[in-house]
């Protein structure tokens, strides 16, 4: 098992290539004292992280650097398939699709009212085995690789992966993460985006992680509280830090191919999180029910 040791971890909250929402956070790792946020980008009034500036930022660090990106770094199996005529999902022999069918069958989802109406549980042209496995085994619902609104991010992530291929290799020093899934796995119940109390939620998370996630001189925690994109970049980097420190292993089958990809999430709840006020919990439950419907 290859040792994972990095001096820096860069977390990237990826946005569209022509937008202004991409953010990056750099952690410096100290084996004795945890991780310290030493840089955030872009700072106020700085140029957005378009492709050229983002690539320059990532390449500006040495070989002892891990990059954690919160966007799909691999494509769903149907989009990688080279078969001229599709035999149909039920007859497909692609290892990833076979695994997804088996996972769906073992979950007992056929009794769910949505699937009784004909809603498919597996769509291998929009989702990968990692998204289905996290949903069925962990109750975590990350965005599908090519789900609604994710296509442009997946395209940009594919471009960045190829542009960095000479230095960064998938699941060695380049990993895919999900800040939302990481926070859920660590036990934080507060919504840190699109919520009335989102800033308070982000502040509470950073405070709870403070024993092993600190902010260095000139890097202000309040900036991450104000910006959901910078906050997610910090959580992406923190996920990468935990991945390396604790040597996480994927939940996929032993014979799964590397190109299948994996969203790395903490293996179990390691923090209790701070509960929402009752009214905010009710709002979140209502939102979750609407999403399920």
Image: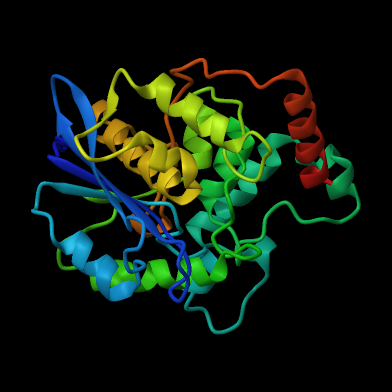
Question: In the drawing, does residue 114 fall left or right of residue 262?
Answer: right
Seen as rendered, the residue at the extreme bottom is 84
Q: How far across and down, in percent of the image, does residue 122 sit?
A: 68, 55
Question: In the drawing, does residue 128 fall left or right of residue 102?
Answer: left
Q: How far across and down, in percent of the image, does residue 238 sit?
A: 33, 36
Seen as rendered, the residue at the extreme front is 45
Image point (60%, 37%), residue name = 198
How many tags in the picture?
A: 0
For the N terminus, the image quarter is top left
Image point (28%, 72%), residue name = 162
Seen as rendered, the residue at the extreme top is 272
Q: Is residue 216 visible?
A: yes
Q: How far across and down, in percent of the image, does residue 152 sit?
A: 52, 72
Picture layout, residue 129 above or below residue 106: below
Image point (62%, 18%), residue name = 275
Q: Pick whichever, 40 or 190, lies toward us.
A: 40
State the image quarter where residue 119 is shown.
bottom right
Question: In the drawing, does residue 205 fall left or right of residue 278?
Answer: left
């Amino acid at each position: 098992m290859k040792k994972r040791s990095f001096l820096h971890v860069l977390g990237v909250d990826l946005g569209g290539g022509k937008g202004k929402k991409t953010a990056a956070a750099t952690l410096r790792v100290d084996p004795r004292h945890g991780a310290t946020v030493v840089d955030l980008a872009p700072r106020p009034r700085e140029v957005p992280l378009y492709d050229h500036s983002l690539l320059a930022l990532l390449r500006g660090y040495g070989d002892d650097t891990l990059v954690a990106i919160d966007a799909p770094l691999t494509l769903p199996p149907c989009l990688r398939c080279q078969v001229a005529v599709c035999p149909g999902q039920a007859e497909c022999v692609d290892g990833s699709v076979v695994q997804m069918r088996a996972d769906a069958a073992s979950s007992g989802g056929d009794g769910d009212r949505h699937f009784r109406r004909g809603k498919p549980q597996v769509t291998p042209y929009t989702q990968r085995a990692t998204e289905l496995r996290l949903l069925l085994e962990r109750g975590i619902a990350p965005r599908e690789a090519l789900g609604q609104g994710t296509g442009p991010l997946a395209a940009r992530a594919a471009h960045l992966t190829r542009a960095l291929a000479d230095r960064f290799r998938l699941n060695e020093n380049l990993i895919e993460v999900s800040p939302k899934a990481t926070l859920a796995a660590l036990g934080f119940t507060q919504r840190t985006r699109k919520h009335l109390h989102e800033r308070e939620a982000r502040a509470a998370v950073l405070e709870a992680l403070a024993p092993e996630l600190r902010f260095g001189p000139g890097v202000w925690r309040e900036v991450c509280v104000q910006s959901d994109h910078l906050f997610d970049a910090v959580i992406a980097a923190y996920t990468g830090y935990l991945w390396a420190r604790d040597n996480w292993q994927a939940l996929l089958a032993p014979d799964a191919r590397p190109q299948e990809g994996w969203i790395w999430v903490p293996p179990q709840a390691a923090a209790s999180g701070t509960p929402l006020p009752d009214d905010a919990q009710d709002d979140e439950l209502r939102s979750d029910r609407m999403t399920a419907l």
